[in-house]
Image: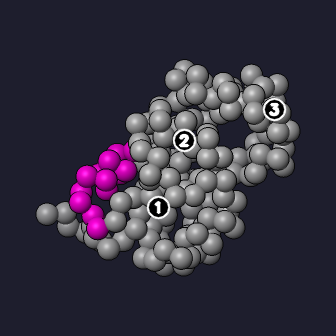
Amino acid sequence: LYKGVDWEMIYVFDLDGTLIDNHLAITNAYLAAGVSMPLHAWGKPVGAWCTAKQHAHKQKVYPKMLERYAKRGPAWPLWMFIQHARILHDPIIITAASEKSAGDALNFLGVANRFLYASGLTPEGKISFLRQRKPAVYIDSDEVYAEHIATESHISFFSTERGIVTCN
């Protein structure tokens, strides 16, 4: 029925910027908390660039910012296809976002929290997680980041940035 689909493969999606286009929601939530989010902060633990109090305030306003600024991300059609194609494994989500932020984003998308397998992951944490799940394809909107994660994990990746698929 679906030619070219590997029914045994685990499809692992990044969340921010991939399943959800929430860049403006995140940056505006931090602005509401009095923090101008630096560019190098994406994908890094919050404690490395803002205080716990600022992050807590961001968490309170984030759901409203999602409603105002977020939309489905570039991998959303692929997520829907994989979820409904009756592939052997459900697609899963891993993210650097906190569990609460990830939950808020999933709620916005109407995706059940059961698909969120890991949150608060550094790049090294994503690599460690993915090394344990083979065969797998890692799907991310950032081509360079996706390639790094997949290469270090010895798995394939798909980047929505240019539609690049690489098999390892």
Residue type at the position of mark 1: Val
Magenta extent = 76-88
Percent across and percent down for residue 4 are 25, 69
Residue beneath the point at 81% across and 32% down: 54
Residue 158 visible in this rendered orientation of the protein:
no
Residue at 44% x, 52% y is: 114
Taking 114 as reference, is 106 above or below it? Answer: above
Q: Is residue 107 left or right of residue 65?
A: left
68 inside magenta stretch: no
Which residue is identified by label 2? 103
Binning the other alpha carbons within 10 Å of mark 3 as few (below 14), some (14 to 19) or many (20 upward) gives: some
The reply, left or right, for residue 121 in relation to residue 18 is right
Disc nearest the viewer among 2 and 1: 2
Task: State the mark number for residue 54.
Answer: 3
144 to the left or right of 168:
right
Q: Which mark is residue 27?
A: none
Compute the Cα span from label 1 to label 3: 30 Å
